[in-house]
Image: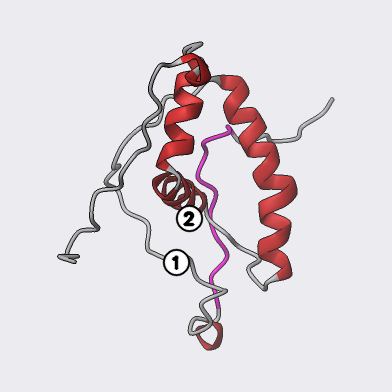
Amino acid sequence: MNNAVVAAPNAILPRKPVPEALKTDTRVEPAFPSSDDLRENLYVRDETVTEFEDAVDFEAKPFLREHGVPNETGREIQDATIQVAKSNLEELAKVSLEGRGVDIEDEKTSKSISRPPEIGNTG
């Protein structure tokens, strides 16, 4: 009989404490603290999440480890994902249109997206 314990995909597992001497290294501690407050839920197709998680596991995480970050957190990956999307709004819109079956090449006019100014940026 197999007595292995399998954690649920969203289970929070305890983290090993980090020695005080290593806490000053930004590669050891997450980029920002965790919070009990959730900002937003993301509703994503199962196949999109699976492909994304595989890409993160096989491409992004090894890249992070090569650069001395052995303990990335899900919140950091999620935050980085939104930052990348925020920096690529036109691509985000194109992928959304493709998901609806809209061929932007067939549109009579092609407009690009202008980014709103960053908060606190008056220039």
Classify mark 1: residues with Cα within 10 Å, few (<14), some (14-19) or many (20+): few
Residue depicted at 45% across the width and 34% down the height: 92
| Magenta region includes residue 16 | yes
Q: Amino acid at mark 1?
A: Ala
Callout 2: SS: helix
Q: Is residue 106 magenta?
A: no
Would residue 13 appear left or right of 61 to someone viewing this image?
left
- The colour scheme of the drawn protein is secondary structure
Residue found at the far top of this picture: 101
Q: Nearer the viewer, residue 92 or 67?
A: 92
Q: Residue at x 42, y 46 (%)?
A: 82
Quadrant for the N terminus, please: top right
| Figure disc tally | 2
Which percent across, then down, holds residue 86?
39, 47
Alpha-carbon distance for marks 2 and 1?
Answer: 7 Å
Q: Which residues are magenta?
A: 8-18
Q: Residue 4: give x, y in percent of width and height.
A: 75, 35
The circle on residue 31 is 1
Dot 1: what SS?
loop
Q: Main secondary structure of the magenta part?
A: loop
Tell me which numbered mark, 2 or 1, is placed earlier along the sequence: 1
Give residue 76's mark: 2
